[in-house]
Amino acid sequence: MPKKTIRDISLSGRKVLVRCDFNVPLDGDGNITDDTRIDGAVPTIKYLLYNGAKVILCSHLGRPGGERNPDFSLKIVATRLGELIGKNVSFVEDCVGEKVNEVIDDLSEGEVLLLENVRFYKEETENDEAFSRQLSELTDVYVNDAFGTAHRAHASTAGVASHVGECAMGFLVERELKYLQEELKDPARPFVVILGGKKVSDKIGVIRALLDKADTILIGGAMQYAFRKAQGHPIGESYAVDEDIPIAEGLLEEAQKRGVNLMLPADSLEADDFSNEANVRNIEPYDDGGSIRDGWEGLDIGNQAIQEFCEIIKGAGTIVWNGPMGVFEIDAFSKGTQSVAEAVAASGAVSIIGGGDSVTAVKQFGFADQVTFISTGGGASLELLEGKVLPGVAALDDA
């Protein structure tokens, strides 16, 4: 069922509580190192201001464990957000209580207030009924624009909605659902899915769900070694957990039955150390007897795999990519991920980067402006691709 958006709601003169995702990375001195998530909230905030709302923003930052911790204060976010929207953003050092109520009572149309970190209260992650009600009493309208936490049933993402008269999604969540849900109902063919990451068990739901939709699923990252081990290939010291081996076997059988090309890298790059100073070697293709030596570890896809993967990507109509091909943070093992990122950018396909480290990679290699859509949610993206219901979306009013 489609959900209401902020376009469907009368806003003038009304208090609007917006759940944003301001969980930004900070350096050792507490400075913001990447403001992408803050910038992602700007279109919704500007729309609310233009339409005369009294805008109240809430978010979490980090994992303070339900305790007040100045290292996780959102005050620095208020400053950066003000710069991005060209308007002062007030800040209050709590998210519920008498002081917050007083500040909100003084809020005028077209003004913005950012509340302190909701995770300073343990009741937030517990989806506590009383805490949800306290949040609801701050507002006339509730808006969820935090896709990155939409898969969490927390007080500020789901619980609050049951106590507010009108609830809608912001533009960021709307856009996420458009690309990760609507676009994939009838994707342009061939539909190519690229999956990386460490554990097969983390992606099993996505792989199974996409076996019904995808034409080709390309497997990279450390989880490729569970598949190779399942096939009987020596993988040296490469990452693979025992529980993933039977899962990998089952997925290979399932893909074969359904006629889906679940494609593993033809070869790998092995190294004797986890560093740029390591000795590295491109192994022979697995089908020609290649394997990873004892004491060595596979840390990227190999040259033949790069060539084959890029050729498939080149002909794609729709691409979904979640997870790097190797340890791209280290230059010696970055070629696979960089090559895939370049191929996706040049493909001309509808290209959706599904959150997590693949987003970091696309930005690092300079291709962020050459893909169709970059998701702001790692776990939320995966759960949506699996076909799961996101609590933060389900809680909103039906359109």
Image (cartoon, helix red, strand yellow):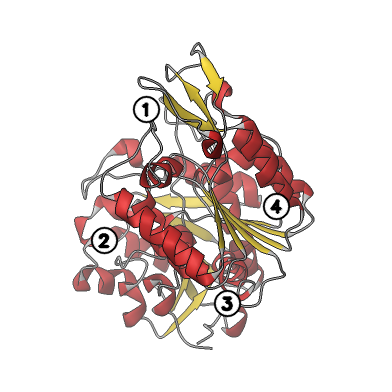
Q: Viewed as shown, does residue 148 lie left or right of 44?
A: left
Which amino acid type is shown beneath numbered disc 1?
Gly
Q: Say which residue appears at 51% left-offset and 71% top-offset.
A: 258
Q: Which residue is mark 3?
A: 6
Q: Which residue is mark 2?
A: 124
Cα separation, mark 1 vs mark 2, equals 44 Å
Q: Quick one: label 2, few (<14), some, or many (20+) residues within 10 Å?
A: many
Q: Quick one: label 4, few (<14), some, or many (20+) residues within 10 Å?
A: some
Viewer-nearest of labels 3 and 1?
1
Q: Say which residue appears at 72% left-offset and 70% top-offset.
A: 188
Q: Quick one: label 3, few (<14), some, or many (20+) residues within 10 Å?
A: many
In x, y percent, where is residue 279? Answer: 50, 13
Q: Say which residue appears at 70% left-offset and 52% top-offset.
A: 312
Total numbered labels: 4
Which amino acid type is shown beneath numbered disc 4?
Ile
Mark 3 falls on what kind of element?
A: helix
Which mark is first along the chain, 3 or 4?
3
Mark 1 falls on what kind of element?
A: loop
